[in-house]
Amino acid sequence: MNHPDQFSGMKILVLGLAKSGFAAATMLHEAGAKVVVNDASPEEGNQEAHLLREKGIEVICGGHPPQILDDGFDLLVKNPGIPYTNTVIEKAEQRGIPIWTEVELAYRISEAPIIAVTGSNGKTTTTTLLYHILNIGGKKPLIAGNIGTVATSVAQEAHADQLIVMEVSSFQLAGTEAFQPNIAIWTNLYDAHLDYHGSPYAYAKAKANITKNQTADDYLIYNADQPELYEHINSSNATMVPFSLSGRSESGISADEQFIYWMGEPYVDRAMIKLPGKHNLENILAATAAAILVDCDKETVESVLSSFTGVRHRMQFVKEIKGRKFYNDSKATNTLATKSALSSFEVPTILIAGGLDRGHSFEELREHMDHVKSVIAVGETAERFQEFASSCGISQISVAETMDDAIQQAYGQSAVGDIILLSPACASWDQYKNFEQRGDAFIDAVMKL
């Protein structure tokens, strides 16, 4: 661990527990800080609070009392999910107390260089693909961040001869100060999480923190096919590495119908790539560029691209049953992700969609609904999705109360050669704890067939 003494003697409030808060509180306590943890969850059943108290850490449960700051703190480390409208956060800002998320802690203690990946969509696939390339290439990578492994815990164990591939969300990036990845990847930018950030500009500004502190010795790999990204990266001092699907380019990494090109030279034949979809080709370009920048050999890249078929809950092929192929795209929590999923197929598709109703439009899907033969709507948006599907000219539309029911209906409506696709275009929290639980329910229901 790099410079653990930097927190010695500081008084630090950790706001919110879960995995990231628990890891941050433990690390800071072991580094000599006076740590107080405040979690909104009730005392009863709060196992993390019990474990932290056993370590000698003060824990206050059951809400976020504004007066907690009256004891005086040098730093506040918050759970990424806690909004900046939280009263304690607002008061900390007024008092000039630095507010970090735990990825800032991870950066400050990591001996290993960091490759950080952000974007509205594609983060998980890009992070996972890059990790596999680096692993096969002998680079001893570690994987961390929003993908499920807490960055602080990974950074504590990392050594200087390793690499950390870190997926970072806008929630996490908003709470950074000195964060400076050696390589930053920005896959794309679309409006998302506006209920948290308040505006598209605030959301994009949080994303842009990934390159805010980079220098010419660092690299920013970005989507050159998105002009809307430019205003947010034009102040970056990083060495720019664009990626593009608009044909062969002399700079960065690009692709046409036949090849992937590196600096204008053919690098990989696209025919060997297993992962379907235009959106996944963007992820492949970004991950490949990063692999090249850390000296992974071409043979390794080709080997992984010819075998990698995606990540769990993101266009995950589940099973083929009597000529019907089932795909789990539960991670598609917005219309852009579902649009990408639909555009990956050109055969009749039974779409299972719907979930938490945030009031957003489904219009972005319209141009990709022509090969959808039926829609099974679920969750809070079921009625709205029915109306939208009907306006697209789809006649076979139904509602399912459970995932088992949805799969039974989908199978009954399908024919040999059809795709049965869960791609909700909505968050999962109306019926499930998270999108992983929703995807697992889909997989379980398919296996029951």
Image (spheres, rainbow, N blue to C red):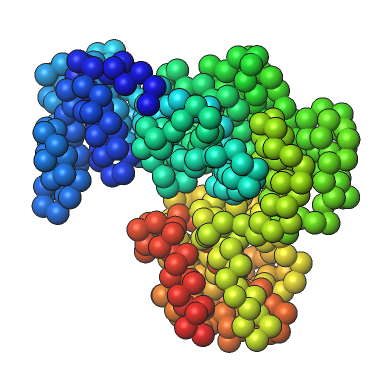
Residue drawn where x is 76% and y is 49% of the image:
302
Q: Is residue 85 left or right of residue 309?
A: left
Residue drawn where x is 35% and y is 18% of the image:
3
- Estimate the x, y position of residue 26 in percent, counting from the top left: 24, 34
Residue 91's place in the image compared with 102, above or below, is above
Q: Is residue 305 visible?
A: yes
Answer with the quarter of the image where residue 1 lies. top left
Residue 138's place in the image compared with 73, above or below, is below
Residue drawn where x is 51% and y is 50% of the image:
360
Residue drawn where x is 42% and y is 47% of the image:
148
- Estimate the x, y position of residue 259 in percent, counting from the top left: 86, 46
Residue 106's place in the image compared with 317, above or below, is above
- Estimate the x, y position of residue 233 in percent, counting from the top left: 63, 22
Answer with the quarter of the image where residue 62 lies. top left
Choose between 172 and 112: the one closer to the eye: 112
Choose between 333 and 60: the one closer to the eye: 60
Q: Is residue 388 left or right of residue 47?
A: right
Choose between 20 and 30: the one closer to the eye: 30
Choose between 379 and 273: the one closer to the eye: 273
Residue 67's place in the image compared with 267, above or below, is above
Q: Is residue 226 left or right of residue 434?
A: right
- Estimate the x, y position of residue 91 in percent, counting from the top left: 24, 21
